[in-house]
Amino acid sequence: MSEPRRRRTLRLRTRVTLFFSLTGLVASMGLAVVTFAVARSFLIDQRMQVARTQTYANAKTVRDQLLAEQQIDPLRDLRTEGGGFATIVQGDRIQNSDVRHPIKDIPLELRTAVGQGASGQQRFELGGEPFVAVGINIPSVSAQYFEVFPLQSTERNLRAIATALLVGAGATVLLAGILGWWTSRRLLRPLSRVATAAGEIASGGLDARMSPESDPDLARLANSFNDMADAVQARIEREARFASDVSHELRSPITALTAAVEVLDGRRADLPDRSQQALDVVVSQVRRFDHMVMDLLELSRIDAGSTELHREEVDPRELLGRIAQRYGFGDVPIEVDPRLPGLVRLDKLRFERIVANLLENAREHGGGPVRVVLAVQGRNTMVLTVDDAGPGVARGERSRIFERFARGSAARHRVGTGLGLSLVAEHAHAHGGEAWVDDRPGGGARFRVSFPEAF
C-alpha cells in the first residue's frame, strides 16, 4: 500500500507574513470604509446646510422685492452659485435666472411639494451631473422660489478622499507585510539556530550547542536544547566507551582461545573423526569471533574520532595488486583506467581495509570477485569497483547493507560479522566519498567506492 502524499503547505514565514498582510488589509479597509462614510455624510450634510441657508436668504430678498411691487427682475441681483440657477413661480408667471434651465429641470416631486405649501430639498442628476435643489413656498406673495446648487466639487472631494484612503490602505498592507516578514524572521531565527545545531549533531559534531539567548522564552528553548544535546552526547559517548571496552576486554581471551584452538588444530590427526568435526566448528567460530572483535574495535576507534585521515602519495596499481595478493585474491583481474595518474593521494591503511572487506564480502556472499577496476570520474575523483558473481543485491536492501550488522537476504544464512560493508562506508566517508552498490551487467553485484580529491 503506497504511502499517502503529504500536502504541500506554505512556509511558516510566508504564513506569518500573509497573516500580517491580511490583518492589515482588513483593518485598513474597515477603517477606510468607516472614514469615507463619515466624510461623505459630513460633506454632503455641510453642502445641504449651505444650500438651505443661501436659498432662504435669496427667498427673503425675492419676497421683499415682490412685496414692494418694483418693476425689476427679482432674480437680477441674486447671488446664485456658479453652475447653479434659480427659478420663481408666481401663478402662471415663471422667471428663470438661466434660460438654459427651464422649470422642468427641477424635479417634479419637489415642485409639487412646494406648490402644496411645503418647503424641501432634493438631490438629483441633470445631464449626468449631481445637483441639489431647494424649494421654498412664499405664501405672502403667492410664489415659490427654487434654487439649484451643483455638487461636482463635493463629489470631487469625495473621490480624492477615497483615493487617499485606498492608497493608505495599500501602504498599510505593504507595511504590515514587511512587519510580518521582519517579525517572523526574528521569531524563526532561534529555530534556525536550533536546526543548524541539530544538523551539526546529526553529522557527528556532538559538541555543537546553541549560544545563550537574552530573551527569557528563547533562553528556555536554548537551555533545553543544550541540556538535551548534553544528554545525547553523554549517552553516545558512554555507549561508545562501553563497546570499545567490551571489545578490548574480549581481545585477550579471544587471543588465548585462538592460540589454544590453533594448537588443537595442529594435532587434529590425533583426534577421532567426530572430534575433528567439532574442532572444525570451534575453529571457524573462534576465527569469526576474533574477526568480529577486531571490526568492533576498529568501529569504536572511528566513533571515538581517534583515527585520523593520513593521506599520502601512493601508486594505486602497485598498492591494489599487493593488497589482492596479501588477502589471497592474486588471481582476480585488475583493470586500471589509463587516465589515472601514477600517484594518488590516499590513506593507505583505510584503502587497504576497503579493498580487503569488499573482496572478502564478494568471496563470502557473492560467489567470489570476478574483477577489480580503478577508474577516473570527473576531474579528480578515483572510483574503486569490485564485481562479483553472486545473486546481486535487491534494490530495497542496497542502502541498508552498509549499516552495522545488516545483511542482505542472499547472505542471511552465511558466515560473516555484518560489519565489513559498514567499515567500507565509514572509511569512504573519511575520504570524503561514498560507497554504493549496483547491478553488474550479466548478473551479480557491483560495489563502488569513490575517493574525491585523490589527484
Image (cartoon, rainbow, N blue to C red):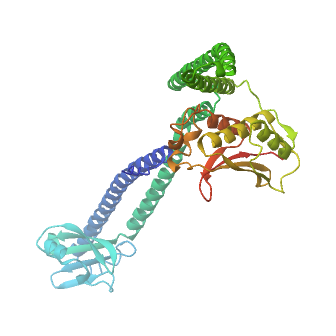
Q: Nearer the viewer, residue 281 or 444?
A: 281
- Residue at 56% x, 25% y is 277
Q: How many marks?
A: 0
Q: Nearer the viewer, residue 316 or 142?
A: 316
To which quarter of the image does residue 296 belong? top right
In this rendering, does residue 96 appear at all?
Answer: yes
| Rendered location of residue 154, percent (x, y) | 38, 65
Q: Nearer the viewer, residue 455 or 299?
A: 299
- Residue at 48% x, 58% y is 167
To which quarter of the image does residue 113 belong? bottom left
| Rendered location of residue 36, percent (x, y) | 37, 56
Q: Nearer the viewer, residue 145 or 429?
A: 429
**Image position of 311 (left or right of 367):** right
| Rendered location of residue 116, percent (x, y) | 10, 72
- Residue at 15% x, 82% y is 91
In this rendering, does residue 143 appear at all?
Answer: no
Q: Is residue 283 above or below residue 421?
A: above
| Rendered location of residue 221, percent (x, y) | 51, 25
Q: Is residue 200 above or below residue 22?
A: above
To which quarter of the image does residue 88 belong? bottom left
Q: Is residue 406 above or below residue 164?
A: above
**Image position of 66 (left or right of 444):** left
